[in-house]
Structure formats: C-alpha cells, structure tokens
Image (spheres, rainbow, N blue to C red):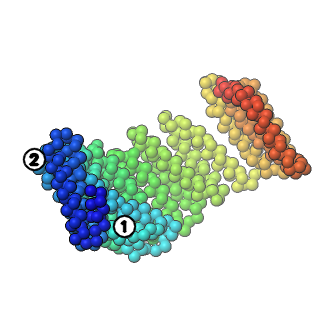
Amino acid sequence: MLGAVWLSWTAGGPGAGARAAGLLLFAAGVALGSARRDRAAGHALGLSLAAGLFAVTALGGVVRPALPGTWAVPVHLALGLVLLAPAGADRLPGAVRRGLGVACAVVQGLAVLWALPLLALTLLGPAGAAARVWSGAPDGAREAVGVGGPWLPRLQAAPLVLACVAAVLAGLAVRRATWRPRVPAGVLVLGWSTLMVTPVVWDVPYPAELVVEVLLTAALLAVATRSGVAESAIALPAAVLALVTSVSLGLLSLATRSATVGVLTTVTVLFAAVSLRRRLTAVTVPVALGHGAALACAAGAAASWAPRHTALLVLVVPAVAALCAARSTDARTTVAVEVTGTAAGCLAIGLAVGDPATLSLVLSLSAVIASGTAARADRRAAAHAAAVLFALAAWVRLAVWGVTAPEAYTAPVSVAALVLGVLRRRRDPQVSSWVAYGPGLAATLVPSLMAAWSDASATRPWLLGAAALSVTLVGARHRLRAPLLLGGGVLVLDALHELAPCLVQITGLLPRWVPPALTGLLLLAVGATYERRLRDVRRGRDALGRMD
C-alpha cells in the first residue's frame, strides 16, 4: 500500500493515477470489509480509518494530474468530505462510522495545515516593514504582507479550504448537540483565518485591507463582549483573536504616516469602548493601554517631536493605567493594567534619557503617579518606587544644574528622613531598617559617591569614606542591615576609586607573569579552604538575616 500511495502521488497523468487508484481502492475495500466483520472495536476503527484514507488518496490521484497545482488540496478535501455520508449511515457498525469520521477529520486537518503558511505570512509579513517605516503605501495587499517574505502562489485556494472546514464544523454543531460546546471556538478561528487571508489572495488595495482588518477587529470584540457570550468558551478566543488582529493591523499600517495614526487611534478607541462594558477587561484594558502608548509614540513622530518631548505624551498612559487600576474590582485586570502602565512608564523614561532636564521631569511625574498608586491600601509598596523615582529625579536635576556639592541639597533631606525613621522605629520596632533608614541614607550617600568619582581632589573621597565607615560601624553596632550594607557598599566603592590609580601603577611595574601567578595562588588558597570559606559565608548570611 505504501508503494501504491507513492505511485498515486507521483502520477504524471490520469492513466498512471488510475492504475494506482485500482490498488488503493482494492485495499480500501478489503479494509472496509474486514472492519465490518471484526468484532473488536479498536480494530474496526483502525481498518475503517485506513479504508477512508486509501479511498481519498486513490480518487485524488486520478483527478489531481488533470487540475492546476493550486486545486490539489481542495480536491482531496472535497473527496474527504464525501466520507461524511457513510459515516452517518446507520446500517454500518458504530466503530466503522467512527473510523470513517476520523478519516474525514484527518483529511480536513491536513488541508488546514496546508493553508497555515499563508495565514502566518499574512500575520507576520508586515513586521518586515518595521525597518522601512512610512516609506509609502504598497500597491496591494500582497505587497503589504510580502515585505521580507516570498509570495506563495500555490496557496490561492486557502480561503476556500478554510471556509469549507469551518462550514463542516458548523454543520456538525447544528446536527449533533454533543459537539456544540466544542465546535464554536474552532468555527470562529477558521472563519477568522478565512477573512484574514482572503484580501491577500484577492490582492485588494492597501486601504481596503486596512478597512477589512479594522472591521474584523470590531466584530471579534463584539462577539467577545456581547450579552450571553462573555461566559462561554468563545469569549476568550474572540478577545485573543482581536488582539492578534490588532497587532497585525498595527504592523500593516506602518507603511504610511496617516495610516499609522489613524489605525492606532481607531484600535485604541475600540478596545477602550469595549472595556467600558466590564467584560474581559483583563485583556481589553491592557491592550487599549498598549495601543495608546504606540499611538503616543506615533503621534510624536508624526509631529516631528524629539523623543524627549514624546516621552511626556507617553506618560499619559501610566497615569490612565493608575486610574483604571484604582477603579478595577478584578484582581487579574488590576495586575495586567499595572504591568502595562509600568512598561509604558519605562518606555517614557527610555525616550527621555537623551535629555537630562526632561529625564528629571519624567522621573518626577512618574514618582507622582507611583505616589498616587501607593495611596491605595493594597498598594502601599508602591511608595518605595515613588521614593526611588523622586530621589533619581532630584539627582538628575542637580546634575543638570551643574551642582558640584550635592550634599548642600541632599543632607537636609537625609536628616529629616532619618529623624522620621527613628520616630517610626520607636513607634513600631518591627519596621525594617530599610524602610526606616534606607531612603535617608541613600539620598546623600549615592549622590556624594557619584560626585566623589568625578572629583579630582582627595578631600571629598576621604570625607565620604569617613562618613560611610561611621554609618557601617553604627549599623554593625546596632545590628541594622540597611546602614551596614549601604555604608559598606559606598565605602568599598570609594576605596576602589581611590586605590585604582595606585593599583594600575603597581601592576605596570611588575613583570607580566606576576598577576597571573598571584591569581593562581589566590585560587589555590580559596580551593584549599573552600569548605571553611563556605561556612564563613553561611554564617555571614545568617548574621545578616538576623539583623533588622
């Protein structure tokens, strides 16, 4: 039978295909007859499955050579669908009917797999235009999705194949109640795939392709959120397909400036409007915010703004995300919205890095947003992020002003913060030293360390080293983790900065073999006392763990 299948697939004409078909049909008849007489259900199912596949291969081998290569798969699919008739005949045993049904399903599955490359090209092909943003509208849908990949001419019948399989599944759902819970999602995916690839096969104009995908996104969102469907198995697949379509649409719109702004505006409004119905908000709200961030970037680029100015526009997204998270009653939606807002905030900071003055403003505004989030009882931890952002904004602003003595600005803040930390610890001894003393110490030590590294004189590094040593000793004396680690870290970095020139000079005077030899001796010493050093490290870790 394997030889007969090979002869059928390699047949150059109807005559050769008919000779192979005779062998295959004879085998199919033997398998089907044996299946009807076999009392073992498993054997009957396997034999009838083989009979169905042999019959489809035989008849397809006869018809295929006379047709263009584009229609080979649709012909085999049509022959496979014929198996539905005997699969529904009551006069056949149940195992035989199931086997023929499985054979039909196998043919349909192979046909869908054959059409998948076109769908993948339609979805991922526009990503190749990211390197040539706003280079001009393509001539048609094929050129729009074919950037960076070849056009697949043999797949022009893919929409027909996908539509036929979707129609078969829909018919099964209508005729058999047991299939209704499982079929709708498959029908939805196949129907969506058909609508996605049809404009590419027909090579419709570029604006028409954009309109089709916008309407498809709106339809999927309507299906996902309409009354009575949101709790069914079709709601989440529809929302995910809407997300995939919107991303593909956004990539497709990168060809022209007006298309990018218009498409992103439309998609953002669609997802935002759907989010108002409070169904599947864990998907729709983050997607709306993500498209809103992309729209802000596109609007800034369209207006020829510098990235630092676009960063201020992008900050609107984290602010909206904070408001949406505060009003959300679903934990999953809250987390998804906050993650999206954080990503947008990081994007804004990245856009402003090139201009320190704007970076300080962006950090300050981000700190305000984080402070507003920390006002919620379940998000008190956001206060730490707000404090860090405020400190970073202050340090960047001091650098912009060309301040060479940051201690004049940071020391009063540190004193006030440490006083508040002491009062907090007296009221609640369980408060961690990082919460009580960490912000106040970091507010002065970090800017002073940065200034010391750029200071040519030795006065500042020595004074900073003495202050860091004092902080370290106080932390060790009172068993406070934050002063110990902060002071020790600053002390080590300050010492390395001061000793680096001497170490470089000493290394230059020594023979070249001395540094590798000393490194080898150090490794030998560490290896010889490895277990003892490991115990020392564990004791140190335990000691730090017992500190406040």
Name the residue beneath numbered marker 1: 210
Question: 539 and 64: which one is in front?
Answer: 64
| Residue plotted at (88% across, 51% down) | 508
Name which quarter of the figure residue 65 lies in. bottom left
| Residue plotted at (56% across, 46% down) | 368
Q: Quadrant of the C terminus?
A: top right
What amino acid is labelled 2 in the image?
Asp
Residue 188 placement, left or right of 315 = left
Residue 487 placement, left or right of 222 = right
Relative to 90, residue 108 above or below: below
Name the residue beneath numbered marker 2: 90
Q: Mark 1 touching mark 2, by CB under 8 A?
A: no
Position in image of residue 324 (x %, y %): 43, 46
Name which quarter of the figure residue 117 lies in. bottom left
> Which callout, 1 or 2, points at the residue further toward the start of the chain?
2
Position in image of residue 358 (x %, y %): 62, 57
Frontmost of labels 1 and 2 is: 2
Position in image of residue 146 (x %, y %): 42, 69
Question: 37 and 515: which one is in front?
Answer: 37
Callout 2: SS: loop
Question: 446 and 361: which one is in front?
Answer: 446
Q: How crowded is mark 2: few (under 14 residues within 10 Å), some or many (20 or more)?
A: few
**Extreme residue toward the left, this view:** 91
Tell me if residue 416 can be seen.
Answer: no
Question: 529 and 488: which one is in front?
Answer: 529
**Disc assigned to residue 347:** none
Relative to 493, residue 481 above or below: above
Q: How far apart are marks 1 and 2 (CA)?
A: 49 Å
Relative to 522, residue 33 above or below: below
